[in-house]
Amino acid sequence: MYNNWKGLTISTVLTISMVLLPLAKVQAQKQTDQDIQTFSLEDTVVTATRIPKTMINTPANAQIITAKQIKDGGYSSVFEAVKALAQANAYSYQDDGSDYGAMMSRIKLRGIDDGTLVLINGNPCNYMNHASLSNIPIDQVERIEIVKGANSVLYGPQAMGGVINIITKKPVKTSKISGKVSVTAGSRLEGSAINVQTDVFDLGIKKTISDDFFDVEHPGTTGSGKALNIKDKSSEQMYFDANLAKHLNFSYGHTNSKAKYETGSFTDYIANMKYLSNIETTNNNYTLVYDDQDTGIKAVAGYNTYNSSTIYDKSYPSHYTDVKYFGYNANFDVQKKLDLRNDKDSLIIGANYAREALKYTKSAAAVTTKNNRDSYSLYQSYDWQATDKLSFIFGAREYHVTSSQYQSSDTQILPQIQGLYKVNDKSSYYFNVGKSFEMPSMSSGFSYNSNFVINSDLKPQSGWSYEIGHKIEDKHKAITTDIFYMTVNNKFYWDKTDSGASIMRNHDKWKNAGLEFNYKQKIDKNLSTDLGFTIQNPKAYSNDDGKWSQDSSKYVINLGANYNKDKFMTDARIFAYLDREPAYYNYERTSSSSTDHNLANSCDFTLTLQYKPTEIDCFKIVGRNLFNRDDVINNHEYYTLPANVTFTYERSF
């Protein structure tokens, strides 16, 4: 089916883009300076300091992704949007960041795996330490705040490389009922959605069916290797947001996904499929937020559940034991903001309680393994305005976690200091230094099948992050630049035993140093462009072999342009990983003739074209991987989808 679409994808989408983009250039040349809209860093971000601050007054690398950017980019998942627009390293099993049971896709801010914390309205919702985003309905997102660098003082463990805070849409009083319906079809997926908004609640439902994807893994140069097909993939999502009282909001997100995972091996380039697993996963996220800015009191209560089953088709030549997971995270956080020195300074004091629980059942043997732990924290953050131009933030978290299977209890003091020098209203310099800490995943004590071994000596990982940066803006552009350095002891990673079984171990050392640059330019009232790149060197060291090994791609590049004129909109984006990490355990794959090789460079070109003939009707076409490259998306060398296109019609009411 993909081959049938390839000609249409290349000829139709690229031809239209070649027509529209030159028109944008001509239009830009005709604009006078009075027509050009200004671009500023005056957007307010809360996640970085727990206090609303404009971007230029925030002493951290902070970024906001808006609902409009998500819509214009044609992204089908939150994972896709964050990966591209935040120029983030990522690990995924398919392009859209889908999860398959315990195989979870995740974002790796600043190159560190299992070191990014995902929040929904301030409610932590990582599963098994993974920064998974597939359980968040994309139509529910109002904005995404991303803060890179250590944030364990304000948000606790897992915030080693950064924090992603998903802020959902809230009901707006308009004294009327409104909404939209949409249908999508194409060579990648089909789907439909409906959204209803009232003064009290916001409700959305979405159904997606993906086309089968064969040859996710390719044979090696000798015609052997692992084989994988993904079939019958679908998802159903529902979200609900409601204003319960003046300062009280409730949000709920539900995702149910299903897929068939057909696996085997290649012999002489012929796939012999041995296993078929039916995987079903259900995620529920409940968040209750009380926020009274008059009193300075904010409280967040969250409860997130994870329910997954893997049932093997017994008609296939081989099968493992059927397994089921059920887990939940419960979180309660309360803070009080105090204004001091005639409102020049502020002090945040807070407390947090969290519980993690996971149950794993092997169905045939009726063997159940359970693991849980509790954590308690107190945190303080003092924002001191030293002079009119110079300010500092001093923070600390006292953190205690109870014992769990294979891990002892632990107590940590996590300090952080930030500073900002504001040159003027258009320029500022900042620094950020903090310590972070993370316990092993709740699932680290489980033996999934004979291919996995439990490491009873797995240690927590901890480290320091250092960052200095500069932010500048003028009438038409915004530029942010930072240099960072991270060190982590006992970094988690997957390895192989002598018998070939998978086991999680600790690297003795892990570090990353890099430069991040982002440039946004408003050319005129219709055309805007942006450029971002990261140059870094993430690497890990083990005493066993006495060598440093590369751990993520060294270069991440993100280039985009958006043109919006009357009824037409065009959004184009190129995203690339260059100088990538080694393939997992150096298996032989088609990306190299050698079994000891790094992943090949990857580059995606996505183009969105939109036409709104009326105020209530919208037609959209999205083309992905328009260079039609055979890129791999993870170190197991799963391949990206070929060039594909989707069409969407949306009607508002």
Image (cartoon, helix red, strand yellow):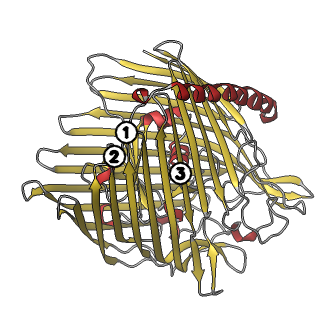
**Counting other residues with Cα less than 10 Å from the Cα at mark 3, is it few (<14), some (14-19), or many (20 or more)?**
many
* Mark toward the start of the polypeptide (1 vs 3): 1
**Counting other residues with Cα less than 10 Å from the Cα at mark 1, is it few (<14), some (14-19), or many (20 or more)?**
many
Please name the residue shown 81% across and 34% down the image.
Answer: 3
Please name the residue shown 24% across and 52% down the image.
Answer: 51
**Counting other residues with Cα less than 10 Å from the Cα at mark 2, is it few (<14), some (14-19), or many (20 or more)?**
many
Give the image location of residue 499, x and y in percent.
Answer: 72, 78
| Helix, strand or loop status at disc 2 | loop
User: Do labels 2 and 1 touch, CB within 8 Å?
Assistant: yes
| Helix, strand or loop status at disc 3 | strand
- Residue at the disc numbered 1: 168
Q: How far apart are marks 3 and 2 (CA)?
A: 27 Å
* Mark toward the start of the polypeptide (2 vs 1): 2
Residue kind at label 2, given as amino acid type: Asn
Disc number placed over residue 121 in the picture, else none = 2
* Mark toward the start of the polypeptide (3 vs 2): 2
Please name the residue shown 47% across and 44% down the image.
Answer: 520
Left or right of residue 534: residue 289:
left
Give the image location of residue 337, x and y in percent.
Answer: 16, 55
Residue kind at label 1, given as amino acid type: Thr
User: Do labels 3 and 2 touch, CB within 8 Å?
Assistant: no
Residue kind at label 3, given as amino acid type: Gly
Disc number placed over residue 532 in the picture, else none = 3
